[in-house]
Amino acid sequence: MRKSISQFLLALAVFLFTLHGGTLALAADFNEAADLQIGPFVPGGSYSEETTEGYLSLREGNSLSPAANGLPARNDIRFKFGVVSVNDGKFLAFATSKKSEMLQTPRHIGVGNTKDEVLAAYGEPDQLNEKFIRGLGWLPVYTYGQNTKEAGLEFYVFKLSNKVVQIRFYSQ
């Protein structure tokens, strides 16, 4: 009897947490096919300059990177609110520091969310590193993806505020 009551209370707590907009997830629940996305941008998705400019504002320039070390050649296109990497008309990577509901992951995490909100939505990261970002210094980077060398979703967190300052997906 006690066991069934505690199971019922646990189920009720999970239901109420989910009902009020919370998400329960573990890193093992990360699904590259569903979660490796920011706004409308998906690795391998078709690149459209019109759609991209609609979300990222004005184009500022681009640079070409030749194929190297088994990675495909890419065209890095800079916009006011993000950088898109493209090869053969398909998205390879996307990064943004723009706070916008239109540029969030499927689990509603984006620039401005806290580290705790990232962990609540995605669980413990598959990798936790630090990367140097000009103007911000060394930032913790929470990376999710089954094979983080080939594809992943990254959250860059500013140490002083514990808030996400950049999100990025990448793939080969």
Image (cartoon, rainbow, N blue to C red):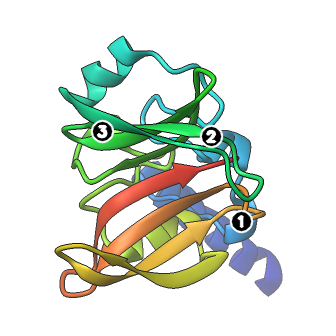
Q: Provide the secondary structure element on which disc 2 rests.
A: loop
Which residue sits at x=53%, y=32%? 86
From this viewpoint, is residue 142 visible?
A: yes
Q: Is residue 91 left or right of residue 166?
A: right
Q: Mark 1 packing: few (<14 Cα in 10 Å), some, or many (20+)?
A: few
For label 3, the residue is: 78
Instruction: Report how far apart the C-alphas of labels 2 and 1 lie in the structure.
Output: 17 Å
Most foreground residue, 125 or 80: 80
Percent position (x, y) of residue 104? Answer: 38, 44
Name above or below for residue 34 compared with residue 52.
below
Most foreground residue, 15 or 146: 146
**Amino acid at the residue labelled 3:** Arg
Counting the numbered discs, the total is: 3
Q: Mark 2 packing: few (<14 Cα in 10 Å), some, or many (20+)?
A: some
Name above or below for residue 125 compared with residue 53.
below
Name above or below for residue 82 compared with residue 68.
above
The disc, 3 or 1, on the residue closer to the chain's N-terminal end is 3
The quarter of the displayed image where residue 94 is located: top left
Disc 2 or disc 1, which is closer to the eye? Answer: 2
**Amino acid at the residue labelled 2:** Ala
Q: Provide the secondary structure element on which disc 1 rests.
A: loop
Q: Mark 3 packing: few (<14 Cα in 10 Å), some, or many (20+)?
A: some
For label 2, the residue is: 73
**Amino acid at the residue labelled 1:** Lys
For label 1, the residue is: 149
Instruction: Report how far apart the C-alphas of labels 3 and 1 lie in the structure.
Output: 24 Å
Which residue sits at x=43%, y=66%? 155
